[in-house]
Amino acid sequence: MVMRKKGKCGSKGLNLASLSGKGADDVLSTDLLAFIRSSLRSVWSLELLLLLRRQAPRAMGVEEMARELRGTETLVSKCAPQLEAAGLIASEQGFYRFAPASPALQELCALLEIEYRERPVAVVDAIVSTPNDRLTSFADAFRFKEKDE
C-alpha cells in the first residue's frame, strides 16, 4: 500500500520519490541515471524510445508513432529529433528507427527498459527531476541581487 505524505498533491508539489520512499538516486545505477538525465527530456521521449526499441529494426512514421503512443504528431515530431541528437534513433526519409550510436548506448537502453518495467516511479522521477536550464534561467531572473553584485 502506498502512503502519501500529508499536504498538497497538485502537479507543482508532487514528489514522486516520496510515494515510493526512495528517489531515483537511491535506486538507479549512476550510469543509467546520467544517461536518463542527459538523453530524455520527458516521459514521452522515454515512451517513444522504448516503442522504437520494441519495433526494431522496423522504422516507423510520425503518424504511426503518435497513434501507438496515443499522443499527437506534434509531440512525436518534437521528441524524435531530440532522441536522434542523443544518438539513440536514426531517421530515414521521415521514418525513425531504433539505432543506438554505440554498444554502450544499446546496453543502457536495454537496462532502461528493464528498470522502467520494474521501477517506473524511479525512472519517471529521474526524468522529471532533471534540472531544466531554461527554467533555471527564468527563475534566476527573479532572484534578488545582493548589494555588492
Image: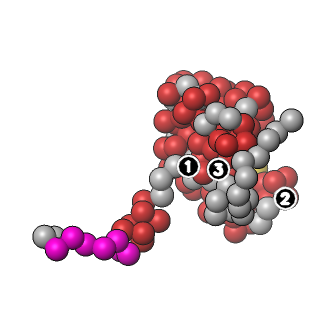
Above or below — where is 113 with respect to 138? Answer: above
What residue sits 73% from the left and 32% below the top? 119
* Residue annotated with mark 1: 129
* Disc ID at residue 75: none
> Which mark sits nearer the N-terminus, 1 or 3?
3
Q: Amino acid at mark 2?
A: Arg
- Can you say which quadrant of the picture contains the C terminus? bottom left
Q: Earlier in the sequence, mark 3 or mark 2?
A: 3
User: Which quadrant holds residue 145?
Assistant: bottom left
Q: Can the viewer see residue 113?
A: no
Q: Is residue 7 left or right of residue 82?
A: right
Point out residue 4 in the picture as x, y percentages from the top left corner.
76, 46
Residue at image coords 67%, 55% = 14
Q: CA distance from mark 1 to mark 2?
A: 24 Å
Q: Examine the residues drawn in magenta and state their main secondary structure.
A: loop
**Residue of label 2:** 70
In this view of the protein, which residue sits in the foreground, 110 or 124?
Answer: 124
Query: Percent x, y for residue 80?
Result: 63, 54
The CA span between labels 3 and 2 is 25 Å
Report crowding for label 1: few under 14, some 14 to 19, many 20 or more residues within 10 A (C-alpha): some
Q: Which residue is mark 3?
A: 15
Residues 86 and 137: in front is: 137
Residue type at the position of mark 3: Asn
User: Residue 108, position in %: x, y?
Assistant: 59, 28
The picture places residue 36, in percent across and down from the top left corner, at 56, 40
Residue 110 placement: quadrant: top right
Please give left or right for residue 56 compared with residue 29 in the image: right
Magenta stretch bounds? 141-147
Q: Secondary structure at mark 1?
A: loop
Select label 3 or label 2 by which is in front.
3
Nearest to the observer: residue 57 or residue 18: 18
Circle 2: element type: loop
